[in-house]
Image: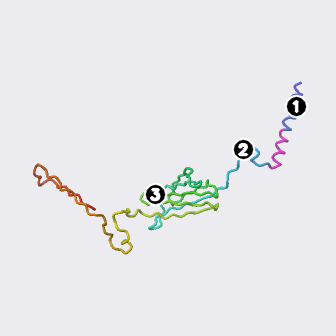
Amino acid sequence: MLRRSHYALRVFVAGLGLATLLLAASGQDDTAKRGRKYKTPPPTARIEVTIVRDTNGKPIENAAVVFHPMVGEKDEGNMELKTNEDGKTVIDVLPLGDTVRLQVIAHGFQTYGEDYKIDKSEMAIDIRMKRPGEQYSIYKSHDSAASGSKPADTAPAKTAPPAATPAKPADSTAPQPNPPQNN
């Protein structure tokens, strides 16, 4: 009886080995093993972003490069990477054909933002970061900026009410506060 069970076991193992060998020889792909609901991921693009200073072209280390995948006008989350010492970062998980909003944030520089259509499998994006400019003011005339003259203050002059006089005479050794100035 013991021989019979060993013989049956050997036949089963040999049959299993033969079936495995036949499957491997037939060249079935991975999708049959994964199940019927498996979908292959879309092809992706490799995007290399280089961040440099606008003034001298030197790389900016540790700048935050944020990718916002866009579906229509809707932001579908974000992925943030940091630049290395060469000012470069690489991402390779964005699908071809998508639109991505690229945002770059670096300390001491203006924030950069632009939309890119991913239409190639290899893309290189070079960004030159600028220093912050002067704040825009609605109280200044900006049409004379093109002529090179100093912008004039177009805001009406405001007069401050006279300051209340203290009850005690002011000590001459104490520092006197500066009166408020209208800009």
| Residue displayed at 84% across by 41% down | 19
- Say whether residue 151 is left or right of residue 8: left
Q: Which of pointers 3 and 2 lies earlier in the amino acid sequence?
A: 2
Q: Residue furthest left?
A: 169
- Residue, disc 1: 8
- Closest to the observer: 20 or 120? 120
- Mark 3 is on which residue type? Ala
| Residue 78, x across and y down, in percent | 54, 51
Q: Which quadrant, please, contains the N terminus?
A: top right
Q: How many marks?
A: 3
The quarter of the picture where residue 14 lies is: top right
Q: Between marks 1 and 2, how big is the CA–CA gap?
A: 37 Å
Q: Secondary structure at mark 3?
A: loop
Q: Which of pointers 1 and 3 lies earlier in the amino acid sequence?
A: 1
| Residue 92, x across and y down, in percent | 61, 55
| Residue 66, x across and y down, in percent | 52, 54
- Residue, disc 2: 37
- Residue, disc 3: 106
- Closest to the observer: 70 or 128? 70
Q: Secondary structure at mark 1?
A: helix
The quarter of the picture where residue 142 lies is: bottom left
| Residue displayed at 60% across by 61% down | 117
- Say whether residue 157 is left or right of residue 168: right
| Residue displayed at 64% across by 58% down | 97
Give the label, 1 or 3, closer to the camera. 3
- Mark 1 is on which residue type? Ala
